[in-house]
Amino acid sequence: MAKVIMHVDLNCFFARCEQIKDPSLIGKPVMIGGFGRRGVVSTCSYEARKYGVHSGMPSFKALELCPQIIMKPGDYHYYSLMSKEFFAFCHTYTSKVEEASIDECFMDITDVIKNKDVNVFLKKFQKDLLNKTKLMCSIGVGPTRFLAKMGSDYKKPMGITIMRKRDIKSKIYPLKVEDFYGIGMRTTPHLRAMGINTIEDLAIYIYKNKNEAQKTFGKYYYDIKACLDGTSDDKVYLDVDDPKSIGNSMTLMMDTDDEDEILKSIRIMSQEVSDRLKSAKMKGKTIQLVLKDTDFKVYLKSHTIDKAINDVSDIYQNAVSLYHKYFKNLTVRLVGVTLSNLVPLHEENVQLSLFEEAPEDKINDVINQVNRKFKKTVVGKASTILKDKKYAHK
């Protein structure tokens, strides 16, 4: 039996969050992004898109197209909270949820929709999400991840599209080649230079020029062919914590080399990791920064510090240090932050300065650790020992 994969994509997520926070913005052109000549539009409301404003556009150009546009720098902590609310809602339907980025996810609903009207189920999901969180979404459903994702992009906002294998030629072939899920901004100009302007053109090239296409796409040839055949990946990858590390990653709204945008993403991921570490009552000593470029090449760099940390500012500072040292000027599509070399809070080694007054609970933790190790009382506080001796002489 074919699986039923659902892709949920929040519509204009950052802009919508700003409208939820400030309802006076509803119905108005709003953009989230940087200011100044180097500022870039991260996302914008549908009202702004009517003027030609879009993600990746320089902010000054957006102002030229829509002088009345309302510019917001972005409240990424608030967006993170709204994202958590979104994912919590999705988990009320099934535990098989894969967080693809801050505003989208894949869900395996094969078992959930048994003996149910799929269209009724999807409309209810969309309506309940709007009522409970005020977030709007587009939904795609298909037997593979690729078809589900293509479905969620097919109609926006608040679209619902079921993509079956038999729909590939009628619904997907006519789309522009850059609409093919997985083909990036850097690849598109090369394809257009080859005369490949639509997904149908891509399919003809893949099927009729196998040897040449294999040279062009390398190992991705078979992935593209499987997508066009409707036989690509149908798995939802669940986020199972590695007990040795805690990390989070996010695919950016757009490929960018803008340092401010990348640092904002690192900040969001640092906050996510900090929250998870504190929830797990853990700290970590090794910080790893993961970046993926526009060609899907993954870069990883890490360093280990002396003292275990779990505070967002410490995580962020160390991750930013790695970025500045190794990745400055890299065009990025994904950002990830991970802490490993973890220690539980109650087992953390405490190195006290001669002149530092340690918290009472830290002292007691260290004493208890030593005594548990030797299975008898071999160390204690001087004040307690002296007190016991005082009373022993009485």
Image (cartoon, rainbow, N blue to C red):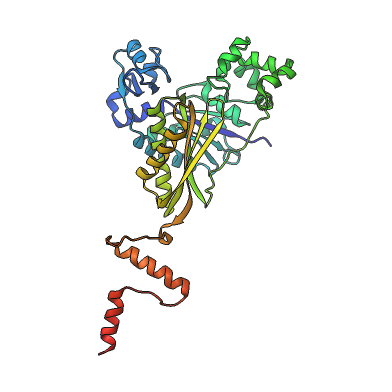
| 382 sits to left or right of 57 | left
The residue positioned 30% from the left and 75% from the top of the image is 382
Residue closest to the far bottom: 394
Quadrant that contains the C terminus:
bottom left
| 317 sits to left or right of 299 | left
Pick whichever, 279 or 332, lies toward us: 332
- Is 123 situated above or below 240? above
Hey, which quadrant is residue 318 in on the image?
A: top left
- Is 69 situated above or below 129? above
Tally of numbered discs: 0
Residue 84 placed where, x, y %?
A: 42, 40
The residue positioned 43% from the left and 26% from the top of the image is 11
- Is 275 situated above or below 61? below
Residue closest to the far front: 354
Pick whichever, 284 or 109, lies toward us: 284
| 124 sits to left or right of 78 | right
Residue 135 placed where, x, y %?
A: 40, 31
Q: Is residue 175 at all visible to an observer of this figure?
A: no
Hey, which quadrant is residue 263 in on the image?
A: top left
Pick whichever, 372 or 277, lies toward us: 372
Q: Is residue 369 at all visible to an observer of this figure?
A: yes
Pick whichever, 247 or 290, lies toward us: 290
Residue 331 placed where, x, y %?
A: 48, 25
The residue positioned 52% from the left and 19% from the top of the image is 185
Quadrant that contains the N terminus:
top right
Residue 298 placed where, x, y %?
A: 55, 33
